Image (cartoon, grey):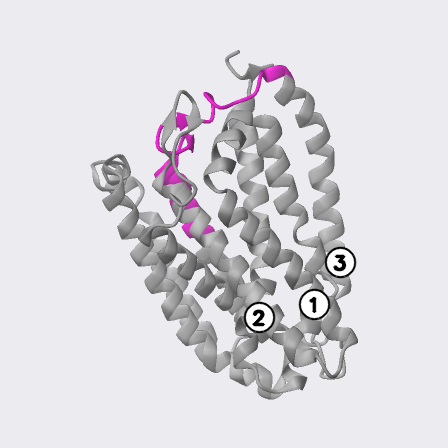
Amino acid sequence: MDGHSFGIDLPLLWAIIIAFAVFMYVVMDGFDLGIGILFPFMRGKEDRDIMMNSVAPIWDGNETWMVLGGTGLFAAFPLAYATILPALYLPLILMLIALIFRGVAFEFRFKSNRTRPAWDVAFATSSTIAAFVQGAALGAFIQGFTIVDRQYAGGAFDWLSPFAIFTGLALVIGYAALGCSWMIMKSEGDLQERMFRTMPVLGLLLLLFVAAVSLWTPLQHPAIAERWFSMPNLVLLSPVPILVLAVALALWRAIRLQREVQPFILTLCLFLLSYIGLAISLWPNIIPPEISIWQAAAPSETQGFLLVGVLFLIPIILGYTAYSYWIFRGKVPAQGGYHGTEHH
């Protein structure tokens, strides 16, 4: 099978769908994990209540995109699924345990009084662990896997490298920045002022981590270095780092002028540009360093059959996600609930 059906490059289309689902998960779950990461720095019960209430109506729908991405990988690229999962069993299991424990802490916190501080600690810890292992898994994916006869031949701890630890810390900072910018948009008064003071620090740290990962990645892979730093690619791909700097400057200006919505949008733009840079570095491999999306693809009949269902499913997910965010738009006051739309 060449992966083409009716003139459509099905492996390419499925790679775009899975990449979109993964990015949507990072966007949708990133800021609510970020709120958990920021939790230890918020000492007041009222501030923590506002932070929790800002995501309470929407947080448990965000994992839909992770499920879509995982099942899409299993169905459309079974070789990639069977190779990547054994390599990342430990971080993925840790992530799932942390996400489950975070959900338990989220629900129990609202129903407890005496034990609420303990659930606060559980929520913050599980959010930070989930963010870190996601970043570490990403770092391991960028590094590539030891493949023999189209099977993973490495060890259970190969994912735990200095580069993976660094990318784990980078994602923790990134999610914290997303959470902070979300709270700028959703809060008011003293809490919002505190977030405005925190955001420049997180924004600078995020920019430094993005720069460091961007420089470290080509050092590990000569092919990636050749892609970015040879002519004419050096000129053709230069808009990506230039846009990162432009967005970072716009973010600093938006914070200085105390804009409420722009910091969140601009932080998302930094994530998107980083994601595009990653895609450029690894393309067309779905199992780094050398197995491409076409080599790992399921038969075209399978991909075509599944595509019909996904083309119906994605608009439904986008529709109910947009509707829930629209319903719960506006500021979150201290007593819970929402103001109207006068702040937007």
Residue at 65% x, 80% y is 117
Q: Is 28 above or below relative to 116?
A: above
Q: CA distance from mark 1 to mark 3?
A: 19 Å
Q: Quadrant of residue 243?
A: bottom left
Q: Secondary structure at mark 1?
A: helix
Q: Nearer the viewer, residue 23 or 131?
A: 131
Say the numbered circle drawn on residue 324.
3
Q: Quadrant of residue 326?
A: bottom right
Magenta residues, start to end: 272-301
Q: Is 194 above or below relative to 182?
A: below
Q: Nearer the viewer, residue 320 or 62?
A: 62
User: Where is residue 319 drawn, in percent x and y?
Assistant: 74, 48
User: Where is residue 77 drawn, in percent x and y?
Assistant: 54, 27
Q: Residues within 10 Å of mark 1 (few under 14, many from 20)?
A: many
Q: CA distance from mark 2 to mark 1?
A: 10 Å
Q: Residues within 10 Å of mark 3 (few under 14, many from 20)?
A: few
Left or right: 295 in relation to 55: left
Q: Which residue is mark 1?
A: 106
Residue type at mark 1 is Phe
User: Where is residue 322 drawn, in percent x and y?
Assistant: 71, 54
Residue at 67% x, 85% y is 46
N-term mark: 3 or 2: 2
- Give yes or no for contact between labels 1 and 3 (Cβ–Cβ under 8 Å): no
N-term mark: 1 or 3: 1
Residue at 27% x, 51% y is 215
Q: CA distance from mark 3 to mark 2?
A: 25 Å
Q: Which residue is mark 2?
A: 124
**Front of the two marks 1 and 3:** 1
Residue type at mark 3 is Ser
